[in-house]
Image: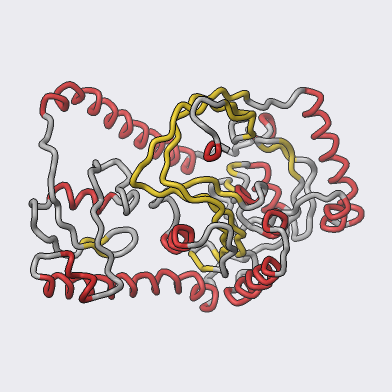
């Protein structure tokens, strides 16, 4: 909505994660960075690479025939955060997504559904819905959405009714009749009381581990309401099969081999360009030469994104000298630092105590968390707090 608005106008109300928001667009600032908005459908539910790919291709073919992207995302996507929004991921810049997803998003045409791509998360069908280089300067008012007591009572009543009927007539059958969306989680363990897509909830974890497959729960309280769960499967303790491990580590091994080759190629380029990075593309057409502009260690780097190792190396390299290959999140780089702002000792002296206290507090928090976790693990105590506090 902001991309189509003029400075000075008020946009909204629109629904956000925080509630209903109204935006006052103050201005639009052009930048060197590019931002895209994309939607996706994630397929990873079958535990088998070929089955996941086949399902993704089936959905892709349906989309090519005119099926609605949002509808299929809500029905089939296994990314619970975006599925409820029709697959919409919102706007993002470089460095915020895994490399394969980022490449497809920033190179894809707006409005075109792309063939499935594979990442460590599964297969993604991506549709780029917007692209811009502008940043918006806004003021906003957010009105949080809070359920009333009567709404909460109605939620609990609906959940209890569904649980009762599902136990009699079947979970999937009743969910379909009620037009409820069924989401299956990935595997989870008992130790951390965490369920993918739902967060920390000891009641849910206890139910899953204390009941048999196909057991259906009563209404269980979660952060945004109530859920009814069915235990869809259990994996016995032990060593995973070779095929299961192979599917897990294959993308990691392939990526490591790609990085090894990239390092060799970067080393070869350095030996041939004679200190002139602009010659790289004539030697290797796949090489990309770009100038990042100014950045600091804790900022997203123009043209690259957030890459701490790149920034750390650039901050200590000598000026106007080609570096050895530097490993980043997306590959290997040859870096030539053109300028560097001198260290501001006066500003550091002013901020030194604040920085020191911040670091010290972080260390205290980490130490306390580790101590408390070990204390809980070693203590002979049964934790029943969830029976009194609802989660």
Residue drawn at the location 32% of the way across and 54% of the way down: 304
Q: Nearer the viewer, residue 382 or 41?
A: 41
Q: Nearer the viewer, residue 236 or 85?
A: 85
Residue 56 visible in the picture:
yes
Q: Is residue 259 above or below residue 182?
A: below
The x, y position of residue 98, in whole percent, is: 44, 58
The x, y position of residue 164, in whole percent, is: 88, 45
Q: Is residue 168 left or right of residue 247?
A: right
Quadrant occupied by the C terminus: top right
Residue 77 position by quadrant: bottom right
Residue drawn at the location 72% of the way across and 55% of the way down: 71
Q: Is residue 72 above or below residue 31?
A: below
Quadrant occupied by the N terminus: top right
Q: How is the image coloured?
A: secondary structure
The x, y position of residue 108, in whole percent, is: 49, 62
Residue 266 position by quadrant: bottom left
Residue 264 visible in the picture:
no
Q: Is residue 153 above or below residue 54?
A: above
Please identify the residue farthest to the front as the structure is shown: 6
Residue drawn at the location 49% of the way across and 76% of the way down: 246
Residue drawn at the location 73% of the way across and 26% of the way down: 147
Q: Is residue 325 left or right of residue 39?
A: left
The x, y position of residue 39, in whole percent, is: 58, 54
Q: Is residue 129 above or below residue 13?
A: below
């Amino acid at each position: 909505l902001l991309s189509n608005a003029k400075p000075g106008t008020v946009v909204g109300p629109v629904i956000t994660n925080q509630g209903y928001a109204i935006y006052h667009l103050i201005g639009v600032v052009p930048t060197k960075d590019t931002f895209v908005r994309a939607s996706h459908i994630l397929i990873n539910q079958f535990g088998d690479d070929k089955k996941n790919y086949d399902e993704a291709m089936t959905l892709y073919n349906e989309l090519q025939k005119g099926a609605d992207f949002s509808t299929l995302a809500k029905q089939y996507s296994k990314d619970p955060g975006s599925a409820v929004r029709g697959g919409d991921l919102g706007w993002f810049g470089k460095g915020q997504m895994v490399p394969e997803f980022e490449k497809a998003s920033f190179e894809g045409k707006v409005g075109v559904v792309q063939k499935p791509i594979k990442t460590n998360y599964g297969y993604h069908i991506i549709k780029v819905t917007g692209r811009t280089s502008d940043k918006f300067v806004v003021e906003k008012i957010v009105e949080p959405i809070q359920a009333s007591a009567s709404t909460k009572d109605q939620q609990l009543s609906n959940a209890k009714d569904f649980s009762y009927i599902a136990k009699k007539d079947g979970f999937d059958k009743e969910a379909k009749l009620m037009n409820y969306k069924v989401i299956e989680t990935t595997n989870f363990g008992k130790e951390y009381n965490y369920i993918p897509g739902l967060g920390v909830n000891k009641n849910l974890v206890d139910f899953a581990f204390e009941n048999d497959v196909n057991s259906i729960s009563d209404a269980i309280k979660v952060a945004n309401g109530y859920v009814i769960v069915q235990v869809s499967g259990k994996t016995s303790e032990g060593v995973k099969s070779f095929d299961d491990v192979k599917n897990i580590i294959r993308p990691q091994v392939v990526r490591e081999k790609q990085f090894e080759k990239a390092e060799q190629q970067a080393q070869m380029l350095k030996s041939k360009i004679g200190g002139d990075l602009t010659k790289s593309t004539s030697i290797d057409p796949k090489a990309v030469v770009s100038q990042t502009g100014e950045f600091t260690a804790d900022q997203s780097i123009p043209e690259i994104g957030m890459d701490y190792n790149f920034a750390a190396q650039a901050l200590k390299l000598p000026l106007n000298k080609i570096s050895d290959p530097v490993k980043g999140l997306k590959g290997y780089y040859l870096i030539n630092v053109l300028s560097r702002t001198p260290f501001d000792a006066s500003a550091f002296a002013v901020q030194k105590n604040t920085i020191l206290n911040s670091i010290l507090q972080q260390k205290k928090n980490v130490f306390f968390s580790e101590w408390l976790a070990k204390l809980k693990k070693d203590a002979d105590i049964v934790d029943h707090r969830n029976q009194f506090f609802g989660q």
